[in-house]
């Protein structure tokens, strides 16, 4: 019996070892991970297509090294893959939405990166590389190798690590507008940007009163959403959709200068001296992420860039364009409603945070008809034609991309409002970061509530910018923030 036990143990150990070995091959991995980009993009990546001839295999990145919980990680990922193979249809997976750092951090191991790259300061490393690795060394708690090397293992043609000089090229043969639209009364109008073929719709938002913030019992409410206060806003015009790439690139082409230094230039200029506005420098890589430009919302520009765009648009149009205040934004997003959303349903109906919804799924028919969010975005921004408008006629106010407001952020902003009615509040007079409102294509339904607040995170959103000083025009680590414009109502002639 003792001998039989030894033989059985040997057979079990040998078979187990062979099973582990076989299920760790690239061929076995690709038999399950059949999504379009997995094998092809791996073969085109620096982990295969390199001068050394060394091939980095799937398990070298997607499992930790031996001695770091490799078998446990293999069991965890394997059981998840087995469940997906048995109970899910691979055609239903939104693979593109999983190609983000947030997702990759869950199945790419830092220890595996450092096992191969034990010396992160090799001879021949460029000065910018040394600066980047020193930055990483000083921020180990908040950064991983994926912050900069997200596409090393799977090639992405849009992940360019250089200035994109050709980013703003467009068709210059189209007929151009010679004048901006003249507004005679308070009603919706279509703005024409002089000197371009670009136009966009503005919606007349009637003034009124509403309760800003969320009630204390609203599901998923955050502390900075209260206390609720009564606010009155004056009439204003607001962009029907978020500023598109067509609109933003009109500004970029009119004001950008290749090689301009990344500093804020204080320029003395007359009202009509449009050429004096210092616009954005060429971006690094592809700010549109390769998803396309056109009517998709412009993304990755900084709050400073959005303010400069509004300044330029005001000058070329002869109107007063700016970012919305936080109060204007929430008033417009609610569209006369006082519920968490302007459509039927509550956050618990649509959020993936609930156990019941995770197990039994979610009926997203209603919310998906109005909002681009994580459940229907395919992991990227979408054109406005995908959704219906809110009661004021505005599209994607609470989804697609987060939107800049003009206010500085403070977690207790509403405590500074009077207990009576506050008229046209502007927010704090000073601060470090600015308010952003609305969810994005990455957001869970709980983050799409009309009262939900957010703020810019300038330092984190510029972590991997290789330039010194960091860019004032483009965020290197944020791809889901944009903006829409407001036009003041006193432009009526």
Image (cartoon, grey):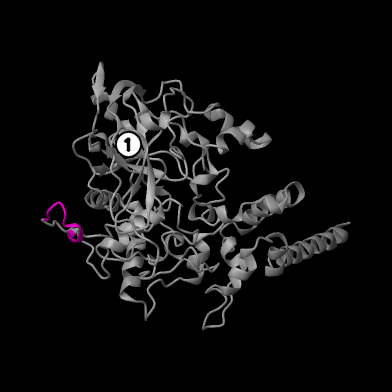
Is residue 70 visible in this depiction of the protein? yes
Q: Position of residue 74 (x, y in %)?
A: 65, 57
Task: Name the residue nearer the viewer: 108 or 3.
Answer: 108
Total marks drawn?
1
Question: Which quarter shows the N terminus?
Answer: bottom right
- Secondary structure, magenta segment, majority class: loop
In front: 214, or 383? 383
Quadrant of image for the C terminus: top left
Q: Is residue 471 above or below residue 481?
A: below
Please tell me in which quadrant of the rendered image residue 354 appears. top right
| Residue at screen point 47% across, 33% down | 390
Q: Nearer the viewer, residue 289 or 150?
A: 289
The magenta span reads 269-276
Please name the residue shown 56% across and 52% down the image.
Answer: 97
Q: Residue furthest top?
A: 420
Q: In the picture provided, is 331 more to the left or to the right than 419? A: right
Is residue 353 among what the camera can see?
Answer: no
Tell me where residue 92 appears, x and y as whole percent: 68, 50
Q: Position of residue 259 (x, y in %)?
A: 26, 70
- Give neighbour class at mark 1: few <14, some 14-19, many 20+ (Cα, 10 Å): many
- Quadrant assignment, res 21: bottom right
Q: Is residue 49 left or right of residue 409?
A: right
Q: Is residue 299 above or below residue 61?
A: above
In magenta stretch: residue 490: no
Residue under the image location 28 percent in, 60 percent down? 471
The residue under label 1 is: 237
Is residue 398 found left or right of 61 in the rendered image? left
């Amino acid at each position: 019996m003792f001998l039989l036990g030894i033989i059985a143990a040997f057979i079990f150990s040998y078979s187990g070892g062979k099973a582990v070995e076989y299920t760790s091959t690239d061929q076995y991995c690709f038999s399950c991970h059949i999504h379009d980009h997995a094998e092809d993009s791996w073969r085109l990546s620096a982990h295969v297509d390199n001068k050394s001839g060394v091939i980095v295999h799937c398990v070298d990145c997607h499992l930790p090294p031996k001695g770091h919980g490799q078998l446990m990680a293999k069991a965890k990922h394997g059981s998840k893959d087995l469940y997906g193979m048995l109970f899910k249809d691979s055609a239903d997976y939104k693979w593109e939405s999983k190609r983000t750092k947030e997702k990759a951090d869950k199945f790419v191991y830092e220890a595996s990166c450092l096992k191969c790259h034990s010396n992160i300061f090799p001879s021949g490393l460029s000065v910018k590389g040394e600066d980047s690795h020193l930055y990483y060394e000083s921020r180990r708690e908040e950064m991983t190798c994926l912050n900069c090397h997200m596409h090393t293992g799977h090639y992405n043609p849009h992940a360019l690590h250089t200035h994109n000089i050709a980013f703003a090229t467009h068709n210059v043969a189209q007929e151009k507008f010679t004048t901006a639209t003249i507004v005679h009364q308070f009603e919706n109008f279509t703005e024409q940007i002089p000197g371009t073929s670009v136009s966009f719709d503005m919606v007349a938002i009637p003034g009124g009163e509403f309760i800003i913030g969320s009630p204390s019992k609203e599901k998923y409410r955050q502390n900075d959403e209260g206390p609720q206060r009564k606010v009155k806003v004056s009439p204003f015009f607001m962009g029907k959709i978020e500023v598109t790439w067509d609109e933003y690139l009109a500004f970029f082409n009119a004001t950008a200068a290749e090689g301009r230094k990344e500093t804020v230039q204080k320029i003395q200029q007359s009202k009509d001296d449009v050429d004096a506005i210092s616009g954005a420098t060429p971006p690094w890589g592809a700010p549109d992420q390769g998803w396309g430009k056109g009517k998709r919302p412009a993304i990755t520009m900084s709050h400073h860039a959005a303010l400069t765009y509004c300044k330029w648009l005001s000058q070329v149009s002869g109107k007063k364009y700016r970012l919305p205040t936080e109060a204007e934004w929430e008033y417009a997003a609610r569209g006369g409603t006082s519920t968490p959303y302007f459509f039927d349903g509550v956050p618990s109906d649509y959020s993936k945070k609930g156990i019941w919804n995770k197990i039994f799924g979610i009926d997203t028919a209603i919310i998906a008809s109005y909002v681009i969010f994580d459940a229907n975005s395919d992991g990227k921004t979408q054109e406005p034609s995908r959704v219906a408008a809110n009661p004021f006629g505005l599209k994607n106010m609470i989804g697609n991309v987060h939107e800049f407001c003009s206010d500085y952020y403070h977690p207790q902003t509403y405590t500074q409002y009077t207990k009576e009615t506050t008229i046209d509040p502007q927010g704090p007079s000073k601060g470090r970061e600015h308010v952003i409102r609305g969810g994005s294509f990455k957001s869970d339904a709980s983050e799409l509530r009309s009262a939900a607040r957010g703020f810019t995170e300038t330092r984190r959103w510029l972590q991997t910018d290789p330039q010194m000083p960091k860019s004032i025009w483009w965020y290197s680590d944020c791809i889901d923030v944009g903006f829409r414009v407001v036009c003041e109502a006193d432009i009526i002639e």
